[in-house]
Structure formats: C-alpha cells, structure tokens
Image (cartoon, rainbow, N blue to C red):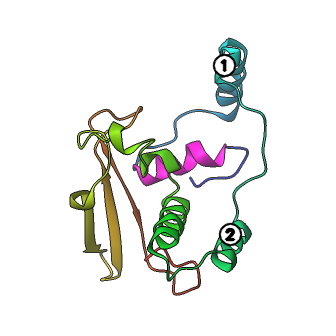
C-alpha cells in the first residue's frame, strides 16, 4: 500500500524506502501522534513554517555565483539534501572544530552505483543518526535539470 490515504507522507516514505510494511491503522496512527503531541515538551516544538520547495532552490541558483567554490558547495549541499529527503544537519557540521569522522559524512561515505535498471545512483552512507546510531543510507539520482543533485 502506498502513501496517501491520510498517512503522514514522511513516515510513510520512510517505511517505503526501508522496505518496512505499514501495519498501523489510520485510527491508531492518529491516536499515537495526538498522544505524542500532548506529551512532547515545549522545547521540542517548533512553529510551523513554509515548506522548502523547488522554487526556493531556484532562488539560490539565480542569486549564487556557482563559479565560486564556496557558493557551489553550499548549493550542492542544499540540492543533495533536498532530493535525498534528508535533514541538512546530516550533511553539515556545526563548526569545523566539532567534526568527528564517526558521526559526520566524508568523501569516503559517498558511493556511485547503478540500480537494477542500470541507472546511476549516488549513495550517501551516514555514519550515525539519532534514529540509527549504527548509521543509515540515503541516495539520489540524476534529474537532468537545473537542480540536478549530481
């Protein structure tokens, strides 16, 4: 069963990507999310904000000088995390002094592969995340457009 039908897209996408079946009914899910919302401390709640959409990536593309390595690096990080459906913090470090190769992604964690149809895929092996301390993978493919993550 696919996403939609009242399921939160992010949770459903996670299950699909990790090949886990969805065994929770919509009523159970609503109860779980409502309970979690009531129990969550105020410090963990963020105000709602506009979604980060492709039109925002286009604004970055228009206003950044991609011949500048610094700008190219920032833009690449934004596009890759957008298409990998990953949090930006998984691909960045808060400060160079806080870099830890056991926690943060490096060039050795990037793989260029091909899927079952022979199409190119770039896999990013995240060494550690809050939900997966042993690490997890995310990936993206070429799009042949202005915002191509490759």
Camera-near label (2 vs 1) is 1
Image coords of residue 14 (percent x, y): 49, 47
Q: Which residue is mark 1?
A: 43
Q: Residues within 10 Å of mark 2 (few under 14, many from 20)?
A: few
Magenta-colored stretch includes residue 82:
no
> Which residue occupies the foreground of this view, 24 or 67?
67
Q: With respect to residue 102, does 82 lie above or below?
A: below
> Which residue occupies the foreground of this view, 44 or 67?
67
Residue 54: assigned label = 2
Q: Secondary structure at mark 1?
A: helix
> Which residue occupies the foreground of this view, 105 or 74?
74
Q: Name which residue lies at 68% across and 52% down.
A: 4
Magenta-colored stretch includes residue 14:
yes
Give the magenta range.
8-18
Image coords of residue 104 (percent x, y): 32, 45
Q: Name which residue lies at 66% across and 14% down.
A: 41
Q: Secondary structure at mark 2?
A: helix
Q: Earlier in the sequence, mark 2 or mark 1?
A: 1
Residue 34 quadrant = top right
């Amino acid at each position: 069963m696919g996403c939609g039908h009242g399921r939160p897209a992010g949770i459903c996408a996670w299950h699909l990507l990790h090949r886990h079946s969805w065994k929770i009914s919509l009523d159970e899910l609503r109860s779980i999310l409502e309970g979690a919302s009531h129990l969550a401390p105020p410090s963990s709640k963020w105000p709602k904000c506009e979604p980060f959409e492709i039109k925002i990536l286009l604004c970055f593309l228009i206003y950044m000088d991609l011949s500048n390595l610094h700008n190219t690096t920032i833009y690449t990080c934004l596009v890759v995390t957008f298409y990998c459906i990953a949090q930006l913090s998984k691909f960045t470090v808060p400060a160079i002094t806080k870099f830890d190769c056991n926690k943060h992604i490096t060039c050795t964690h990037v793989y260029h592969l091909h899927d079952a149809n022979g199409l190119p895929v770039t896999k990013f092996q995240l060494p550690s995340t809050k939900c997966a301390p042993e690490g997890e993978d995310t990936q993206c493919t070429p799009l042949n457009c202005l915002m191509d993550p490759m």
